Image (cartoon, rainbow, N blue to C red):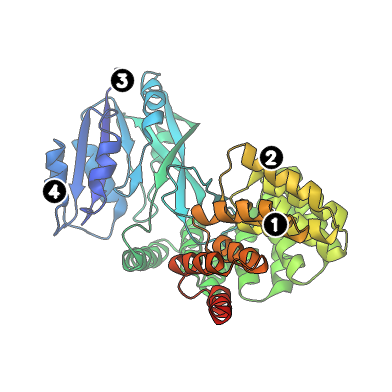
Amino acid sequence: MGNTISLAMIVKDEGQVLEECLESVRELVDEICIVDTGSHDRTLEIARAFGARTIGYLWCDDFGAARNESLRLCSKDWILVLDADERIAKEDIPAIKRLAKGPPAFAYEFTTRNYTNATDIADLESCAPDDPHARGFAGWHPSTKVRLFPAAPGVRFEGKVHELVEPSLARARIQVEPCKIPVHHYPHIKGLNHTHEKQELYLRLGHDKVVQDPTDPKGYIELGNQYAETGNFEQAAGAYREALRLDPSNPLVLRDLGGALHMTKRPEEAKKALLLALRLDPELADAWRNLGVVYLDQKQWPAAIESFQNALNAKPDWTDGYRYLSIALEGKGDFERAAQASHKALQAHPENPECLRLYIHQMLRLERRQEARDMLQRLIDEKVCVANIHNALGELYFYDERLNDAKAHFERAGRLGSSAGYNNLGVVLMKEQQYDKAAAAFEQCLALEPGHHGALANLQKVRNRA
């Protein structure tokens, strides 16, 4: 078997995003095979400009069938599956080519980074300020599925929605191996209307799937996940309960049921589901995390601390867990350990404003301003050029009347796009009675954030003095 690669895609009205997707894999794939399910924009024009093999396909509410039609077009040794709003980073192309030089007895499961601004997602990873793939999004949450597999007989997608190739790979005795190469997914770049339409389609197809086979718990799990994604946690809980009726000992479903029940303000039921999940799998880090959040909301500090610590023990790379742990420790009144935990959280996520605020608040409470300044300066020395860090460092200098140092950092924060930095700079200049310069700083703040109440009031003060 050779090492040539076909790109298999299904599309509809992807003119806004398709060109960039195809450009990202131009040097990777040997042919592009696209099934169009009814585009009315420039999608097919863009596809043909890249030399793609294209066919039209009558949409029949079956993603698996459309995917299999794209596989039918493929003629190369390996198949790579992407959607139009997904990208492969240029630096990762050589590694994928190396995989395709390997034996056809393996397929590869990639982690998809789903970029979002929804910061309440439990497994959200914050984007670093210099991440070229972030595109202004706050973070991403992971999902995994097979993306690269040999073009072997009998390998096909199964499922009308949330379609997977994994079952057929297992029957073909092709082993699935994890791959660390990320797929960058931007589900929201086409706007909220597109996102909502897509969610509604998945919900409708999810309902069809459980009607078609009401004995399959996976259908109810997928439906529950889809409801949770749309924020309908009441319906999500109902779907998870149906899945548990068919598969009572599934700890992952109990974990998700606990999370949904927590979101519907039923903490006791949530705890019951999560504790049962942990009885079945004591190493289930996400269940410990969800349980800790329930205890946190109930101000049951020792139980929350224990839960977050267990989550960190089970999943040491869950660095955001230190922020949760710090909040619980502070609630208990243990500011010393709370600051230690928030210090770890800030080191891991210097771009996260919540981690920064928590750390500064606790260090101020402990009256350890010098230590806090040293910590923030180290982050800056490590080239973490985050406006919030400069602004916080300026505030720490301001507390100790080191006004020149404070001004330098507030100005730097402003130049990095922080309206608060310019407002704070104006406050220092006003304190020094440099009213014209203070007014200019407040105006710069308002240029970035026209409704900034502090800057509006401060600007009026300095104008009155003039």
User: Looking at the image, which residue is at 70% across and 49% down?
Assistant: 345
User: Looking at the image, which residue is at 49% across and 62% down?
Assistant: 220
Image position, residue 144 (x, y; %): 48, 43
User: Residue under circle 2?
Assistant: 378
Between the residue at mark 4 and the residue at mark 3, the CA separation in whole angstroms equals 27 Å
Q: Amino acid at mark 4?
A: Leu
Between the residue at mark 3 and the residue at mark 1, the CA separation in whole angstroms equals 63 Å
Q: Amino acid at mark 3?
A: Asn
User: Residue under circle 4?
Assistant: 44
Mark 2 touches mark 3? (CB < 8 Å): no
Number of other residues with Cα within 10 Å of mark 4, as a class: few under 14, some 14 to 19, many 20 or more: many
User: Looking at the image, which residue is at 19% across and 37% down?
Assistant: 73
User: Residue under circle 3?
Assistant: 3
Mark 2 touches mark 4? (CB < 8 Å): no
In terms of sequence position, does the residue under pointer 2 or pointer 4 come before the other?
Answer: 4
**Closer to the camera in the image, 26 or 218:** 26
